Image: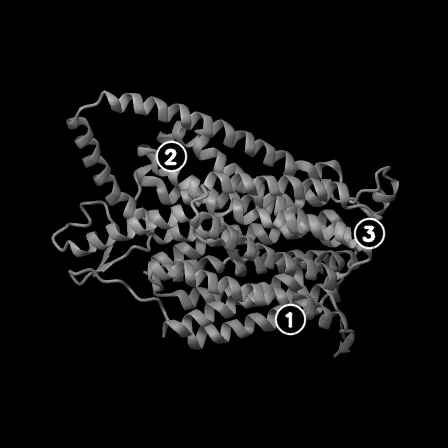
Amino acid sequence: MLTKSLAVLALIGLVDSISYMAVSPSLIFYVVQLGGSKEQYGLIISTFSLASFAAKPIYGSFVDRAAQSKFRLIYLISFVLSISGALIYFVAGSLDSVLMIFIGRFLGGLGAANQALGYAYLALAVPQELQTRTTAMLSMMRIVGMATGPAVNAFLGKIDATIFGVAIDSLNVVGLLLAALNLLAVTMVYFFLSEPPKKDTPKGKAFSVTAAPPQSPSPLLYNYNVVLSIEILLPIFIIFVAVASFQLIETALPPATSHSLGWGPVEASTVLGGSSVVIFGAMVLVMILSSKKVSDTVLVVIGNLLWVVGGAAIYLLWTDESLVWHFIVPVMISMSGFPFLGSPNRSNFTKSVKSKPELENSQAMMQAILSMASDVAGFLTPSFVAAFVIRTPEEVEAAGDHRELTYLALYGPVFCILSLLGLAYKYRREQRRAEENQKQLAGEGTPLVASSTRARRRSSVVEVQQEFSRKNEVARRSSTEMMGLCAFDTREEKENRDKMLLDLQVLESLGELDFEEEGCLCFDE
């Protein structure tokens, strides 16, 4: 039963990736064909991401209220929204209306938010020790979908027909393709996706480690000085910058290559598809380096350096006289940096949160904030890039440097340099703090140490319920997602989660323990 359900999730990932590869390279051409501007093009991309951002908590709330027994229903609703958006996207060509593209992509974004449901489903149905492997397999399916992008766009590029008086060309037919793919997904979900199982404790009651954990009233409000510390803010800033830098490539590549090289959707999708392979390869490299005990901070430094080099090359090499490699190489260098900024940065963030006793009851919420930083960058950046970074063909020809992008394209490298400075400051601060702690520990007696140990054990009970909550798991996966690919856990993350898993097993084996009094998650009769 689980194998069938995972196959359905893999198919959903395949549909998402093919849809992305069909829309992203061709959207600018569709907007221009209907008389739209580059600013409207950016707003449409932002609208899709904003709709997805807004729908995720709604889906999550629905699943929680339904006690995780209505996954198929919410999936089906999301696909109905996607199909509706796809059909409106198609009709926009006949109506010659950019506004209809807006509406179609907005509905599509509402439907695309169902990816968070996939992470929640895995948290419920797949054992913790198998989740990394399962996530890797689902990511591979997405890479397969992206690899088919050039072939799909080449096929769509040949379409030019009139059916029942409706003109169908290579741009509006994308809407029909999306509708057909999502209809296939609806069929598979309806017939083959089973509801996730509930876990039972030795008492025979369902111990829900997948709901949102209880939290004290407005804990972040009372501890704003802790939340605003550099240990917390720096990882949030780093992931925001990484996603914002990616959005520069996604938004600017199709129009820039169209003007400079005469490329269309096929060539642009080839570059984007190739970059997904680079990202996956870099994920594997990060996993290997982490297993060799390369620290998470060093990995984050490497990622920032790659973005500095790649981002600077994008600005300097993307001109109206560029060669093909001038576009491809900077994109690949930049894309290879994201896996170094994904799970290692998340790991640093998690360790910082766990080191703050004031945030003990807010760990899942903090992971959600990290994920929100990624989402906010996703819907803010495209509009900015389209309005202030991308140049029109007339602006490129009039500019003395003949660059496809304005100097504001350097926001990525500049912000990455700021991230590196922040990491250096944080490292020096931690060194000084460690030296002070060593001096303090040298003068402490046994009673104080024992008291500290007891306090930490009590905290670990709370940490366990936070660690394995559905909200935490969805936020963790979403915060490191790029092009639908979810980063692997680092060695330090695996070690921490293995320890938490042992603690969870101990808690589940203690039949005499009153979970509700301990502040654990809910029981369902």
Identify the amino acid type marked 2.
Leu
Nearest the viewer among 399 and 442 is 442
Sooner in the amino-acid sequence: mark 3 or mark 1? 1
Identify the amino acid type marked 1.
Leu
User: Is 160 situated above or below 23?
Assistant: below
Give the residue at x 83% y 48%.
Answer: 320
Give the residue at x 26% y 43%.
Answer: 462
User: Is 111 situated above or below 156?
Assistant: above
Please give the residue where the numbered disc 3 appears in the rendered image.
260
- The local crowd at label 1, few if under 14, some if 14 to 19, many if 20 or more residues have their Cα within 10 Å, is many
Q: Do the residues under discs 3 and 1 have CB atoms within 8 angstroms?
A: no
Give the residue at x 50% y 42%.
Answer: 299
Give the residue at x 66% y 67%.
Answer: 175
Identify the amino acid type marked 3.
Ser
Sooner in the amino-acid sequence: mark 3 or mark 2? 2
Visible in this render: residue 76?
no
Q: CA distance from mark 3 to mark 1?
A: 29 Å
Q: Position of residue 25 (x, y in %)?
A: 70, 59
Single out the mark in the foreground, 3 or 1: 3
To which quarter of the image does residue 117 belong?
A: bottom left
- The local crowd at label 3, few if under 14, some if 14 to 19, many if 20 or more residues have their Cα within 10 Å, is many
Task: Residue at the far bottom: name it.
Answer: 164
Q: Secondary structure at mark 1?
A: helix
Q: Position of residue 341 (x, y in %)?
A: 52, 44
Please give the residue where the numbered disc 2 appears in the rendered image.
220
Please give the residue where the numbered disc 1 appears in the rendered image.
177
Visible in this render: residue 496?
yes
Q: Position of residue 332 (x, y in %)?
A: 65, 51
User: Is 72 situated above or below 298?
Assistant: below
Q: Secondary structure at mark 3?
A: helix
- Quadrant containing the N terminus in the rendered view: bottom left
- Quadrant containing the C terminus in the rendered view: bottom left
